[in-house]
Image (spheres, helix red, strand yellow):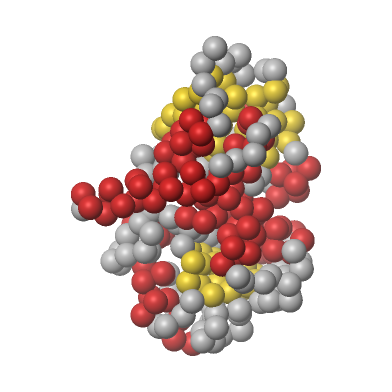
């Protein structure tokens, strides 16, 4: 019997998950299809309920529903419960279990880039679902100074209190940190978007790693500014691949073909750049 998976969010038209997960399913010989499930908020409950069907393995969850989906689930894995956000749902014989692979995927991406977390100072921009996963993962991995900045200060304060971090003003100087991570969706507006984040990268230490977890476009405004300032930078694609690999393993119980997933993502991105 053919089974199905998909990504739930709004918007999802930009998502690379269908490409990378479809490639992984083919490589593993699993008879399943992965869909884009664009889901307006009034339809979210019905969409989550549909994941209980016998032919559905589960789903990814993206902006803006990583926290909104929690009440619709039967069980939440301990780490996801602590984080308060879910990006992966597994259908276990009609019971829906929520997981969070964002933080682990982020740590794997940093490790792959050669950046060590222990004792380092981090500034996270944003306080939504992805930021929560990353903040908890960083704290567990032994990060030193950890600060949270958000347009809405009370959200930064809430997350900071949960992970023993410092809430700081939006636009806070970046000179204190070894790594600055944009966890917002601002980068999806493109490298020349006028809604740039209000951070002066000229004040950063030369070794400060600038990360934008947005992966399409690959060069966001923040990444473009980091390169112009001569700073090391990391886009969102490695995190996407690693968190997707962890989700694949939760759905299938099999090792994820990471290089196949990476190649599929690169192929789509190359095609998009050519078309533009």
Using the rendered image of the protein, determine whether residue 44 is visible from the camera's viewpoint. Answer: no
161 displayed left or right of 243: right
In the rendered image, the vertical position of residue 209 relative to residue 261, given as above or below: below
Q: For residue 19, which quarter of the picture?
A: top left
Q: Residue at 47% x, 55% y: name it.
A: 237
Residue 215, image x, y percentages: 43, 55
Q: Position of residue 72 (x, y in %)?
A: 64, 28
Residue 186 or 25: which is nearer the viewer?
25
Q: As drawn, which residue projects farthest toward the left?
A: 275
33 sits left or right of 247 in the view: left
Snapshot quadrant of residue 122: bottom right
| In-front residue for pair 33/80 | 33
- Which residue is rendered at x = 42% and y = 83% of the image? 230
**Residue 113 appears in the rendering:** yes
Identified at 56% across, 67% down, the residue is 113
Foreground pick, 248 / 219? 248
Q: Position of residue 49 (x, y in %)?
A: 58, 21
Q: Quadrant of the N terminus?
A: top right
Percent of width and height locating residue 150: 55, 64
Horizontal side of 121 relative to 30 (left or right) equals right
Q: At 70% across and 18% down in the image, what residue appears? A: 93
Total count of labels: 0
Question: In the picture, residue 114 is in which quadrant?
Answer: bottom right
């Amino acid at each position: 019997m053919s089974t199905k998976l998909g990504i739930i969010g709004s918007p999802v038209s930009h998502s690379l998950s269908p490409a990378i997960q479809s490639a992984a399913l083919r490589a593993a010989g699993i008879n399943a299809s992965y869909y884009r499930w664009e889901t307006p908020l009034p339809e979210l409950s019905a969409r989550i309920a549909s994941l209980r069907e016998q032919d559905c393995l589960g789903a990814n969850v993206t902006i803006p529903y990583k926290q909104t989906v929690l009440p619709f689930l039967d069980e939440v894995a301990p780490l996801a419960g602590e984080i308060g956000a879910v990006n992966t749902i597994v259908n276990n014989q009609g019971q829906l279990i929520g997981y969070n692979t964002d933080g682990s995927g982020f740590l794997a991406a940093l490790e792959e880039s050669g950046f060590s977390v222990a004792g380092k100072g981090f500034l996270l921009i944003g306080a939504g679902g992805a930021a929560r996963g990353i903040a908890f993962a960083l704290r567990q991995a032994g990060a030193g100074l950890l600060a949270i900045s958000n347009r809405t200060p009370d959200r930064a304060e809430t997350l900071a209190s949960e992970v023993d971090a410092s809430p700081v003003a939006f636009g806070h100087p970046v000179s204190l940190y070894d790594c600055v991570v944009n966890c917002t969706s601002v980068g999806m507006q493109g490298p020349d978007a006028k809604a740039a984040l209000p951070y002066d990268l000229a004040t950063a230490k030369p070794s400060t790693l600038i990360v934008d977890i947005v992966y399409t476009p690959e060069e966001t405004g923040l990444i473009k500014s980091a390169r112009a300032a001569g700073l090391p930078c990391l886009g969102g694609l490695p995190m996407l691949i690693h968190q997707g690999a962890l989700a694949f393993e939760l759905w299938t119980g099999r090792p994820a073909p990471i290089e196949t997933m990476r190649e599929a993502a690169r192929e789509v991105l190359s095609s998009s750049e050519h078309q533009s």
